Image (cartoon, coloured by chain):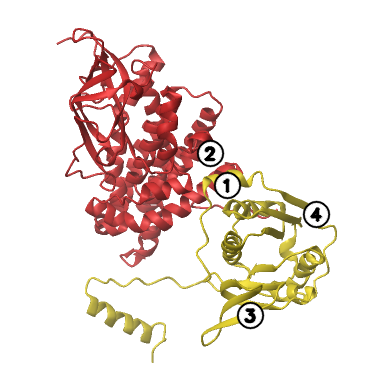
Amino acid sequence: MSKPRFNPDDPFLFESLLGEDDRLIMETARDYAQSQLEPRALRGNQDEIFDMDIPREMGELGLLGSTLPSRYGGVEASQTAYGLVAREMERVDSGYRSFCSVQSSLVMFPIHEFGTEEQRDRFLPRLATGELIGCFGLTEPDHGSDPGSMTTTALRTTDGWVLNGAKMWITNSPIADVAVVWAKAKENKTDPGVIRGFLVEKGMEGFSAPKTHNKMSLRASITGEIVLEDCFVPDENVFPDIQGLRGPFSCLNSARYGIVWGALGAAEDCYRRARQYVGERKQFGYPLASMQLVQTKLANMVTAITQMQLLALRLGQLKDEGLLHPTMVSLAKRNNCGRALEVARTARDMLGGNGITGEYRVIHHMVNLESVNTYEGTYDIHGLIVGRELTGIQSFVPRGNDV
Amino acid sequence: MVLNAYDASAVEEALVLRDQFGGHINLLLVGPQSAAETIRKALAMGADSATHLVYEASSDLDSGAISEILAAELSGAEYDVVLCGKQAQDTDAGLTGGMLAERLGLPYTTNAVGLEIDGGQIVVTRQGDSGRETILLPTPCLVTCSNDMNDPRIPSLKGIMASKKKPISSRPVESAPDNATTMVGFVEPPQRPAVTMIDGTDEAEAVERLVRELKNTSKVLQ
């Protein structure tokens, strides 16, 4: 038996815990991301470019909606495999992972989970190939962490619904062919309404999706609004049964699960680049790597990454076994985004002035992770979800301090 | 376990030919059980079936012994072309293909960068010393492939899942042939000296410093 070796790029032999299918899928995602996405990343981030060939490329490899059955264009990949794909996309840029997450978890997942058979057949195979692009509209200008207070409405009319309202911070919306929009469905104007899901398609009258400009984060991913002005959506484009926040929240749980893995990929890339840099850069006659402060920073990074890896892997196993509780996802999303952001900020610091330039790429990860830490449930909101689970008391709405 | 880059190019070329002319691609591997993952990868790329001759200590065998095991498997088998990587990525030996051709009595050529079929003949573009040679071979024949031949495809997730259902005949090599060669010495490569990074902010100054380093420190320049 040869002496065990410590591998700085996989210190706890994390990848040896993966099954063969999952590892092969990871390698495909990694080969694609490193050969096709990495060369686009610097320009994509600096000049706000999302190459429109990317959806088709991802679709050809089967990276979109991979967990779905084959008749809808998936391959019934494991949840771990889905996570590993997210990790490889975000190792390059959180924006590319965001595209994948939205398409797979926020659009294909709800159509498969809540849609009619006709809706599944109409949309899923073409979303899987990347021929169609989807987006997900829940957040509104005045309703972020509190989506239950949304003001977008769908009023009953003959053979369908008339939608009015605005959604904000919608990944992919300016390029989307179909939007999963959540709105308060009302049988009549005085009805308080119940949240339902609508498939709004490009070209429907009253639907527009202007682009959001001047984002300083996720610049390689296109973000926009969804504006609905008396937009008629026929009955065949409405999810038939799902009502209330359970619909959008189950989508978010699926996407948040992918983020747990994605944030890990970004952190790993920052750590790898920082470790390489401090080995090469000399100051005061010695490599930075020989300095005590630098070594403990590296130690903290690799410790955080090891925790993130094992947490993500366990979460995937639980999801595959059907034992996943949403609070587990909240805990892991909060932890991995928070830790990844710390790792990225530390890497940025370790690279000194060079860490400020795009070429070294760590500042891209750092500013991207600011969004990732905020979207799909902020760090604090996920803390409150875990807190509610631990105490049985919700604290989203402050009690005893009514103003 | 990593699929040898030269073998990956051989697989890619076989896939292109099969898709163009029809046929069947069988993969043949001598190696430990853990190398089965490289077969999965090539099946995921699109190969049809595989034969895994399992031998745990295959890295102790020399090219002569490996080629003998392969030749025993292929003698009597029907095939048009045997495609091999031109060498192993780790050992760089590059002997197995030629030895296998000799044992099977096949015409062969090496370092192929292109391969076509023309009227039942195999047309190989070979990277030679001073240029590219075009070589005709009758079938059956053996060709060793360069990684400059093509850009091996990335297996799709569909291919990965489908590869689970493809037939793999796996059986042990009961007794391996003796090595004809014996390694009698081994020296680890010398440690590389530390890399010196030259600040490139001022290009003229950086070039001057580089020349100075090459003359005085590494003595590459006189």
- Residue B147 in sight in this render: yes
Q: Nearer the viewer, mark 3 or mark 2?
A: 3
Query: Which colour represents chain A?
Result: red
Q: Which residue is mark 3?
A: B136
Q: Amino acid at mark 3?
A: Leu
Mark 2: give few (<14), some (14-19) or many (20+) Cα within 10 Å: many
Identity of the residue drawn at 43% across and 27% down = A118
Question: Which chain is mark 4 on?
Answer: B
Q: Is residue B205 left or right of residue A295?
A: left
CA gap between label 3 and label 1 equals: 35 Å
Labels 1 and 2 within one chain? no
Asked which secondary structure carries label 4, the reply is strand
Question: Which chain is mark 3 on?
Answer: B
Q: Amino acid at mark 4?
A: Pro
Name the N-terminal-most of marks 3 and 4. Answer: 3
Q: Is residue B2 left or right of residue B81?
A: left
Labels 4 and 1 within one chain? yes
Q: Which residue is mark 4?
A: B172
Asked which secondary structure carries label 2, the reply is loop
Q: Are marks 1 and 2 in contact (CB under 8 Å)?
A: yes
Question: Could you say which quadrant of the image residue B182 lies in?
Answer: bottom right
CA gap between label 1 and label 2 equals: 9 Å
